Amino acid sequence: MTTALRAGKNAQKRKRIVNETVLVVDDEERIRSSLRGILSDEGFRVVDTAEAPAVMDLIQRESPALVLLDVWMPDIDGIELLRRIKSEQPEVPVIMISGHANIQSAVAATKLGAADFIQKPFSVSGLLASISRALDGGSAGPLISRSRSDETPEAAQRKPLSRGAFAQRTLARSIVLGGLGLHTGLKTGVILHPAPTGFGIVFSSLADETAVPVSVDNVTETGYNTTLTAGGRSIRTVEHLLSALHGFGITNLLVKTEDEVPALDGSALELCKQIREAGVTDQDSPVDPVRVREKIVVGQPGEAQEFISIEPADHLIIDYTLEYPKPVGRQKVHFELTSPDRYIEEISPARTFAFVGELRKMSEMGLASGGRLDNAILVDDQKIVNTTLRFADEFARHKILDLIGDLYLLGRPVLGHVIASKTGHSDNLALVKEIRRSLAM
């Protein structure tokens, strides 16, 4: 059974007991009729209207547990109506529905307070999963066991639940970010929804229910970014988001986006700020971290060689050596992931970088179309041309940022001492595959 169907069936049992009211606002009678049938069968009391100006009075009179609101209304724009609802009745969750959904609309609506944004035509299971999320406070499924919702990374280091295992983790509430895709150059965004135990980290689009789980098996590109593909849908440049999630130890999350995660400023800093503001919550079920049993080496270790290795350790340790011609030169960084704070302070601000001479090649490959002066460090053969470095060794720190993200393709926190020299995404993936193979032995 899919996660969406499980969420729908659990929601069905709960709603039939309490008979909650749903207000449907849509100018199409066909849509209203369909939703009346579906929601009534699920035990909801349904009130519907095609008259947008009447909505505020209906909310006042009917006290709905949820509003389903079409974006395109003839009298009042749905986004404007959403703004009005959240201003006057902020406690009422609103799910936006549209036949012409895009991630920009979803980001805008979510920033205004929408609980979710779904596209017509929607499936019954997808609709019920969205309703379940909204009524359960924004989670990707019901029955999340929460610790304090205001828990911060400083106060909530990962708690052991059993010998050798830690608590699974999710966000305390949904967050949303918008920006450009680094490689597609298109406006994009990402909405992060809390998810129940055992859900994993799963990417999904607005247009359909195609799920792209974070998995080694779903990696299809590691040239200048890490791309995941499943069910005919690809999500580019997932490594910075996965790195931040690894830094916080978040194991369960529904990620709604389109073809590429936004680059933001080229680092993971803004992602970390948003996660810290939203808060993380430990869940009742345990997760066993990936514990490396023996030393694994990819490549040929040596002072001038490209290689990556990992050996047993009680937390994630990374020693990275980078070497480029001047002005970058040779950089060595030692990092230990012992808390979210250390990740935020030492790694998350490090930005991606590109050499001016490589940009033409990347452009010919259809990449770096979204590269701008404010989302990457640009380097020519003499100097850094567009910014001041945040760290003297920012280039090597960003390589560690990418590596932490790529290691999270295993879906669990990784414990081990990694030593890497002159490596990139392809080498990281090769190591991840070898780790998984060693665990299966």
Image (cartoon, rainbow, N blue to C red):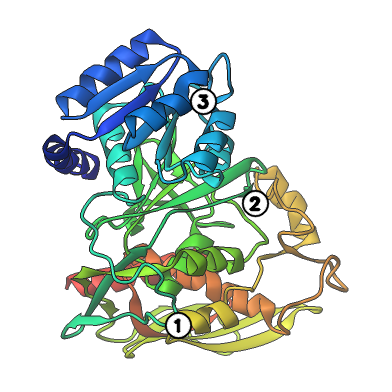
Residue 101 sits above or below residue 113 on the image: above
Rendered-image quadrant of the N terminus: top left
Do we see residue 368 in this rendering?
A: yes
Residues under labels 3 and 2: Cα distance?
29 Å
Q: Which residue is mark 1?
A: 154
Which badge, 1 or 2, is on the more N-terminal residue?
Answer: 1
Residue that extends furthest to the front in the rendered view of this protein: 61
Residue drawn where x is 15% and y is 24% of the image: 41
Residue 313 sits above or below residue 187 on the image: below
Which type of secondary structure does the marked residue at label 3 adopt? loop
Residue 124 location (% of width, % of height): 25, 27
Lateral position of residue 36 relative to residue 383, left or right: left
Residue drawn where x is 80% and y is 60% of the image: 356
Q: Which residue is mark 2?
A: 182
Tag 2: residue type?
Answer: Leu
Residues under labels 1 and 2: Cα distance?
31 Å
How many numbered marks are there?
A: 3
Which type of secondary structure does the marked residue at label 1 adopt? loop
Q: Which residue is mark 3?
A: 71
Task: Tell which of 23 and 235 is nearer to you.
Answer: 23
Which badge, 3 or 2, is on the more N-terminal residue?
Answer: 3
Within 10 angstroms of label 3, few (less than 14), some, or many (20 or more) residues?
many
Which type of secondary structure does the marked residue at label 2 adopt? loop
Tag 1: residue type?
Answer: Glu
Quadrant housing residue 167:
bottom left
